[in-house]
Image (tube, coloured by chain):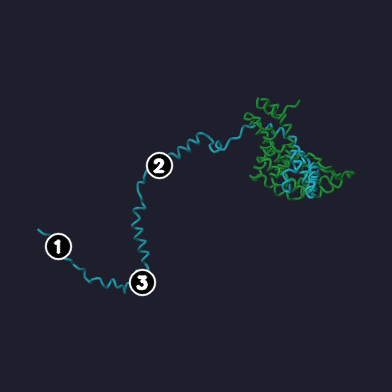
Chain colours: A green, B cyan
Amino acid sequence: MARSDVQLMLDVKAGDDSSFELLLRRYRTPLVHFLCRMVRDPATAEDLAQEVFLRVYRARMQYVPSAKFTTWMFRIATNLALNAKRDGRYRQLEVSIDQTAAPSESDLPALEVADHQPGIESELIARDRAAMIRRAVETLPEKQRAAVLLHKYQEMGYDEIARVLECSESALKSLLFRAYETLRIELAPLIEPERARKPEPKSGEVRTP
Amino acid sequence: MNCQRIEKNLIAYLDGKANPSQRREVEAHLAECAACRERAEQFRVLWGVLDELPVISPSPSFDAAVHAHLREPRRAGLWTWLVPSPRVAFAVTALVVFSVWLSSFPPAHSPTVVAAPSSEADFKMIEDLPVLENYDVLANFDALSELPAQPVVRAQPQPQL
């Protein structure tokens, strides 16, 4: 049975560095993904994610399992991302976000244009859709963006996200509503065709994000 | 419940995380408000669309970079940076103390006090210069005509014996 994050962190505190390795493997991708969407640059996101792990390791002796490990870790990550942007160290990223993202889609695999395979058209469409979604998410205000990333992609609970963002649950729900409302409008060209293809859900049917 | 009140609970409802009373309220509102029903349905589809955002994975060198950072000596804090070594700190402190001690003595000479009357007289002369250089003013200066031609020799009082 896999050990919980808290147990791993307590083991790290007790001097077991192999437990830190497990935490690193468990959270390196979620952290880099989150930070990349926050600071809009993969290299910067990696730097900051390394800094997060470094801070977690160095704070191991003061670690008290009063909250979930992920709350603590993403709080460090969010603060680092917001500070990095406020410091202006990554200001050049602000300029590039308004430009057409399609040519610089570094997070997508390179397209084999010379192959002329039948799937090339659908691949191009997928790239365009991904670029549009990325732009919509990355142009959200910072706090709304962090809330959506933690809610949609990390699947955190409201209480946990509220702790990460240092706000009340009620404020978080409003924040999420506003963020999804903006995304609903921005991504309307992608939503409508999807709705036409899918059957109407039954009344009361719920779906996890 | 109106459209604004539903805003806070709509996401939780769609998540399946609303409590029973919130759920009943949202469902009652959705049953009678076509606009919110439409919005709720668009949110459901939106969440599916957002799944298409590619996950960004760390580079293959990520773990090695983390380990390299862990091996680095801890970075110095702000105060440590400001005080590079105890010797420099001692020298700066000694200099400050010496300067304060030196400034506590009164100065031996005060050149400004000596120069003050001279400067004042010069300033007065410069201020009256247009009048002194104007011959008409001096020629018709009534106060000058009232002066005696010869100096008056006043009788010296005799000391009483």
Q: Assign a secondary structure to mark 2.
A: helix
**Which residue is the site of mark 1?**
B157
> Mark 2 and mark 3: span between their CA atoms?
53 Å
**Which residue is the site of mark 2?**
B102
Q: Label 1: chain?
A: B
Tell if the residue under mark 2 belongs to the same chain as the one under mark 3: yes
Q: Label 2: chain?
A: B
Mark 1 or mark 3, earlier in chain: 3
Decide which of A129, B50 is in the foreground and name it: B50
Residue A14: quarter of image: top right
User: Which percent across, then down, holds residue A108?
Assistant: 79, 42
Q: Three-letter amino acid code at disc 3?
A: Asn
Numbered label attached to residue B134:
3
Measured along the vertical axis of the image, is residue A182 above or below residue A7? below
User: Which percent across, then down, holds residue A54?
Assistant: 66, 33
From the image, state whether disc 2 or disc 1 is nearer to you: 1
Marks 2 and 1 in Cβ contact (< 8 Å): no
Q: Three-letter amino acid code at disc 2?
A: Leu
User: Which percent across, then down, holds residue A52?
Assistant: 67, 36
| Position of the C terminus of chain B by quadrant | bottom left
Q: Three-letter amino acid code at disc 1?
A: Pro
Residue B104: quarter of image: top left
Q: Residues within 10 Å of mark 3 (few under 14, many from 20)?
A: few
Tell if the residue under mark 2 belongs to the same chain as the one under mark 1: yes
Decide which of B75, A73 is in the foreground and name it: A73
Mark 2 or mark 3, earlier in chain: 2
> Mark 2 and mark 1: span between their CA atoms?
59 Å
User: Which residue is at 11% across, 59% downward?
Assistant: B160
User: Which percent across, then down, holds residue B55?
Assistant: 77, 39
Measured along the vertical axis of the image, is residue B92 above or below residue B154? above
User: Farthest residue in the right direction?
Assistant: A118
Q: Label 3: chain?
A: B
